[in-house]
Image (cartoon, helix red, strand yellow):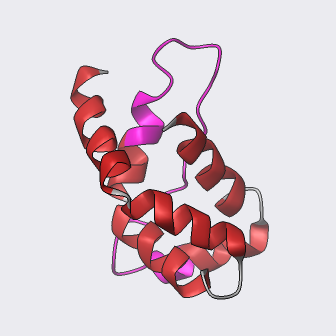
Amino acid sequence: MEDLIHDLHAYIVRSPKRYREFKKFSIGITNANKILRDNDTRWISLYEPTRRVLIEYRSLTGYMYEHCNTVDKAKDLLFHLTYFQILLTLCGILPML
């Protein structure tokens, strides 16, 4: 799960072009919030990034679906976002944090 959050942040936020496209895509679907990065120096650093991924889940999956035919990384991220065990982990771990 940590890798998924890290990869989502790296794919969308580290590229100004992708971040603009994601924000434009997200309007009307979710709040178009920035995907947060986990912080290794804090013991509870996954709470806010996990929460943000769940809030932006519909936008993330839609955005990755649009790019999965042209970008392999988007295809991998879409697979991980829609894989039921990862989704259950995201939803199940948040209350424990």
Does residue 66 lie above or below 61 as drawn?
Answer: below
Does residue 31 lie above or below 7 as drawn?
Answer: below
Does residue 70 lie above or below 1 as drawn?
Answer: below
Residue 35 visible to an observer of this rendering: yes
Is 25 positioned to the left or the right of 14 in the image?
Answer: left
Give the overall secondary structure of the magenta segment.
loop
Specify the quadrant of the image occupied by residue 38: top right
Is 66 positioned to the left or the right of 55 in the image?
Answer: right
Specify the quadrant of the image occupied by residue 18: bottom right
Residue 88 drawn at (x, y percent): 26, 45
User: Camera-side residue: 79 or 60?
Assistant: 79
User: Camera-side residue: 72 or 27?
Assistant: 72
User: Camera-side residue: 86 or 34?
Assistant: 86
Q: Which residues are magenta?
A: 23-50
Residue 62 drawn at (x, y percent): 43, 78
Residue 37 drawn at (x, y percent): 61, 39
Q: Residue 37 lies in magenta, yes or no?
A: yes
Residue at the image position 29 percent from the left and 30 percent from the top: 93
Quadrant containing the C terminus in the rendered view:
top left
Residue at the image position 76 percent from the left and 75 percent from the top: 17
Residue at the image position 23 percent from the left and 35 percent from the top: 92
Residue at the image position 48 percent from the left and 65 percent from the top: 79
Is 2 positioned to the left or the right of 7 in the image?
Answer: left
